[in-house]
């Protein structure tokens, strides 16, 4: 009510300048919008100094002096008395720790924002605080809480029309963590609608990256690469160097994964090397660790992977990435690294574990336990599939049957099959298509169905079969080609006399009219070359598909007698089998009965 009275008095002219406009809530270090509210209060010298620390921290952050920026914001937080200024500073700190991969610290400051919003009974603050909590819990792989807080953010009014878009994005990422692909697509669709309505290109960029990750899991690699190409095109319009580097690093990491899965190992290695360098420059330890894991996967797929020296390097990267991700509380990252290690151990047992499948089984079980705790069904499916193959080689039919039954149940729960042909998707690279109801089918089956049937309804939900516009790849790009305001394309006007405080504009507020870190023309040309290179890769892939040229894949390991069985009996019946050794959370991930590569 006080805010309403102030705004009313301002409108009728009973309050005269000077008054101060401040921005409440940033989302990604100045890339997004703000909420501007007038208030009239004399500012003491101490408060001026505290606000100066806020703005100095913004400038230092854009100059990549992250530790100094955080120090300034903490100093300001101790001295600030105004609730809105404290809320802004807490948002700065939460996003800074999110960018560095310190998700527990991010959660700490997001919780302080929530306490402040509750004390003030401010619905707008609550909307933003719930959003930061949803983002923090999604990074910490607590997907249930991320969904709850994301939905809570949508239930509160927001001053910025883009806030619901980021809430839908957080919800989509949480559903993706749970492997709930239909719900994930629905949330991405809603987020894309907000991005189109508000013209927020960075929201669209993050949606493209998320959709690229989704279609990588579903093994439609052509769509995944096209979405990532769209994200790379959007990043060209970002002129703040640290913001550009952060998103470019993320895009390149996902590109390296998609290109490796498609078999373009040279291009994948180039993208991963640059992502590693950018992750080091931006200080994102969690993303740097994921890039290390991706690089190890690439070396594993290369022809050199039969050499023990290369496998030694890959295994060392896996273990280092696991330690970093564990220190960052990135549980989903831990699962990804363990899954890669389990796959490596399953495919190259002679290098990793001597002559025994036991360590490969142990790694798969450890990965399965963590994935089950998080609720990540897709990783659980992969683990059960690998375990079934390992038990088959050990002639342990009972354990193999249990693993295959669990894999079949997970496939049904995730609905990884096409209702038109009844065949499962997600096993090999094939084109998929989503309807407006977010159900996914083989594109060829859906095309035939729409041509032949008069009653064009979805076979799963009986809704009208309409191809989703936002995730349809029938058009070259879902990205607009107009020049975008950087770093966001929002056209919200700032009231006259307002003092803008987002991080992008902070340098100008401090008297420096030049951007602190802007992209040079050479950097833009480099981005254009990257897009051209990716387009050429996509063209080669399409031409390869048109000529029906089969991609050369690594042959399966030759069959051999099970090394842990005796007289055809399963391992559990062999008396001389040594007892299993538990994996320590802090110790090495592989125990050796003889010198192995982990001892090098």
Image (cartoon, grey):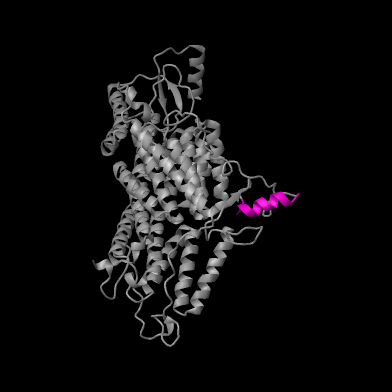
- Read off the magenta span: 439-454
Residue reaching furthest bottom?
Answer: 567
Q: Is residue 115 left or right of residue 186?
A: left
Locate the C terminus by quadrant.
Answer: bottom left
The image quarter containing residue 64 is: top left
The image quarter containing residue 315 is: bottom left
Q: Is residue 312 left or right of residue 492?
A: left
Can residue 146 be seen from the camera position used here?
no
Relative to 477, is 159 above or below?
above
Q: Camera-side residue: 237 or 381? A: 237
The image quarter containing residue 31 is: top left
Q: What is the chief secondary structure element of the magenta stretch? A: helix
Decide whether residue 332 is among the magenta residues. no
Identify the residue at horizontal 47%, vertical 72% (top origin): 389
Identify the residue at horizontal 32%, vertical 56% (top origin): 321
Relative to 512, is 529 above or below?
below
Q: Camera-side residue: 1 or 556? A: 556
């Amino acid at each position: 009510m006080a805010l309403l009275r102030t705004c009313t008095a301002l409108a009728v002219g009973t309050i005269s300048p000077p008054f101060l406009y401040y921005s409440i809530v940033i989302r990604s270090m100045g890339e997004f919008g703000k909420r501007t509210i007038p208030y009239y209060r004399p500012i003491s010298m101490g408060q001026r100094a505290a606000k100066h620390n806020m703005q100095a921290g913004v400038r230092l952050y854009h100059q990549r002096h992250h530790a100094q920026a955080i120090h300034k914001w903490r100093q300001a937080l101790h001295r600030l008395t105004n609730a809105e200024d404290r809320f802004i500073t807490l948002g700065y700190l939460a996003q800074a720790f999110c960018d560095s991969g310190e998700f527990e610290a991010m959660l700490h400051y997001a919780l302080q924002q929530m306490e402040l919003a509750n004390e003030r009974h401010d619905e707008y603050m609550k909307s933003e605080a719930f959003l930061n909590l949803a983002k923090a819990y999604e990074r910490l792989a607590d997907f249930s809480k991320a969904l709850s807080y994301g939905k809570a953010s949508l239930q509160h009014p927001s001053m910025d029309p883009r806030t619901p878009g980021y809430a839908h994005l957080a919800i989509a990422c949480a559903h993706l963590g749970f492997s709930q692909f239909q719900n994930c697509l629905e949330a991405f669709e809603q987020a894309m609608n907000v991005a189109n309505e508000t013209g927020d290109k960075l929201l669209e960029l993050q949606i493209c990256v998320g959709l690229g990750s989704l279609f990588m899991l579903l093994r439609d690699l052509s769509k995944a690469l096209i979405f990532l190409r769209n994200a790379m095109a959007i990043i060209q319009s970002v002129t703040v160097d640290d913001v550009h580097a952060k998103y470019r690093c993320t895009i390149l990491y996902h590109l390296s994964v998609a290109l490796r899965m498609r078999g373009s190992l040279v291009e994948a290695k180039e993208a991963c090397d640059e992502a590693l360098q950018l992750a080091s420059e931006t200080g994102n330890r969690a993303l740097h660790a994921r890039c290390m894991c991706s690089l190890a996967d690439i070396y594993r797929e290369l022809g050199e992977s039969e050499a023990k020296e290369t496998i030694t390097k890959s295994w060392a990267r896996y273990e280092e990435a696991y330690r970093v991700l564990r220190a960052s509380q990135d549980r989903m990252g831990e699962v990804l690294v363990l899954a890669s290690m389990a796959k490596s151990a399953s495919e190259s047992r002679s290098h990793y574990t001597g002559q025994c499948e036991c360590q490969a089984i142990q790694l798969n079980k450890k990965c399965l336990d963590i994935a089950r705790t998080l609720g990540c069904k897709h990783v659980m499916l992969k683990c059960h599939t690998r375990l079934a193959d390992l038990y088959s080689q050990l002639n342990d039919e009972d354990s193999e049957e249990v693993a295959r039954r669990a894999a079949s149940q997970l496939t049904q729960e995730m609905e990884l099959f096409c209702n038109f042909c009844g065949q499962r998707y997600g096993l090999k690279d094939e084109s998929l298509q989503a309807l407006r109801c977010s159900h996914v089918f083989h594109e060829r089956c859906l095309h035939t169905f729409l041509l032949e049937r008069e009653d064009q309804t979805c076979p799963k939900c009986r809704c009208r079969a309409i191809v989703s516009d936002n995730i349809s790849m029938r058009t070259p790009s879902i990205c607009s080609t107009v020049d975008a305001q950087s770093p966001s394309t929002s056209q919200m006007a700032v009231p006259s006399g307002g003092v803008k405080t987002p991080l992008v504009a902070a340098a100008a507020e401090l008297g420096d009219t030049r951007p602190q870190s802007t992209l040079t023309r050479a950097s833009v040309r480099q981005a254009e070359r990257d897009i051209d290179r990716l387009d050429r890769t996509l063209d080669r892939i399409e031409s390869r598909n048109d000529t029906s040229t089969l991609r050369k894949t690594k042959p399966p390991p030759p069959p051999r007698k099970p090394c842990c069985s005796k007289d055809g009996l399963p391992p559990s019946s062999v008396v001389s089998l040594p007892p299993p050794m538990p994996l320590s959370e802090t110790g090495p991930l592989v125990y050796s009965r003889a010198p192995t590569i982990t001892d090098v």
